[in-house]
Image (spheres, rainbow, N blue to C red):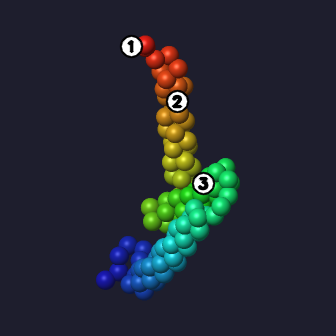
Amino acid sequence: MNTAGHNRDEMSKDLSGSVAKNFVIYVCMLIIAGLQFVVAYQHIDSSQMFLRMFLLAIVEAGLAVMFFMHMGAERRNFFVTVAIGLVFVLSMMNMIWSDSFRLLRFQVLK
């Protein structure tokens, strides 16, 4: 039975390619997790460790979003819209930091 625009061979090729791609990405994520373990046990200063772990976390999160959340298969306009919304939400969440620091500085004496 053919569905609209797809036949059985195309659907099976899409499925097999998807499983293989997801497996490769999963292995890459395991390697990144191993690298995080190695970086954690290196004797380096905290700023270098933070930078290395942050970069590894960004790469790992990017892989997870692009492949396991299927953002890589979406249209570019949708991806740009989600990215702009994410940046906006994160920047608005950052607005509370100044308020929390103010509360720490000017605590009411008991």
Q: Earlier in the sequence, mark 2 or mark 1?
A: 2
Mark 3 is surrounded, within 10 Å at the Cα level, by few (under 14), some (14 to 19) or many (20 or more) other residues, namely few
Residue lying at 47% horizontally and 21% vertically, measured from the top left:
103
Instruction: Name the spot of residue 22 as percent of width and height, x first.
Output: 47, 75
Name the secondary structure under disc 1.
loop
Residue lying at 56% horizontally and 58% vertically, measured from the top left:
57
Numbered label attached to residue 97 = 2
Instruction: Name the spot of residue 29 as percent of width and height, x first.
Output: 52, 70
Q: Nearer the viewer, mark 2 or mark 1?
A: 1
Circle 1 residue: 110
Instruction: Name the spot of residue 109 as percent of width and height, x first.
Output: 43, 13
Instruction: Name the spot of residue 33 as percent of width and height, x first.
Output: 52, 68
Name the secondary structure under disc 3.
helix
Q: Distance between the Cα atoms at labels 3 and 2?
A: 20 Å
Q: Residue reaching furthest bottom?
A: 9
Q: What is the three-letter code of the residue carrying label 1?
A: Lys
Name the secondary structure under disc 2.
helix
Q: Nearer the viewer, mark 3 or mark 1?
A: 1
- Asked whether residue 74 appears in the rendered view, the answer is no
Question: Foreground: 75 or 6?
Answer: 75
Q: What is the three-letter code of the residue carrying label 3?
A: Phe
Q: Distance between the Cα atoms at labels 3 and 1?
A: 40 Å
Q: Quadrant of the N terminus?
A: bottom left
Numbered label attached to residue 54 = 3
Q: What is the three-letter code of the residue carrying label 2?
A: Trp
Against 26, residue 83 (above or below) is above
Q: Earlier in the sequence, mark 3 or mark 2?
A: 3
Q: Quadrant of the C terminus?
A: top left
Q: Earlier in the sequence, mark 3 or mark 1?
A: 3
Residue lying at 57% horizontally and 62% vertically, measured from the top left:
40
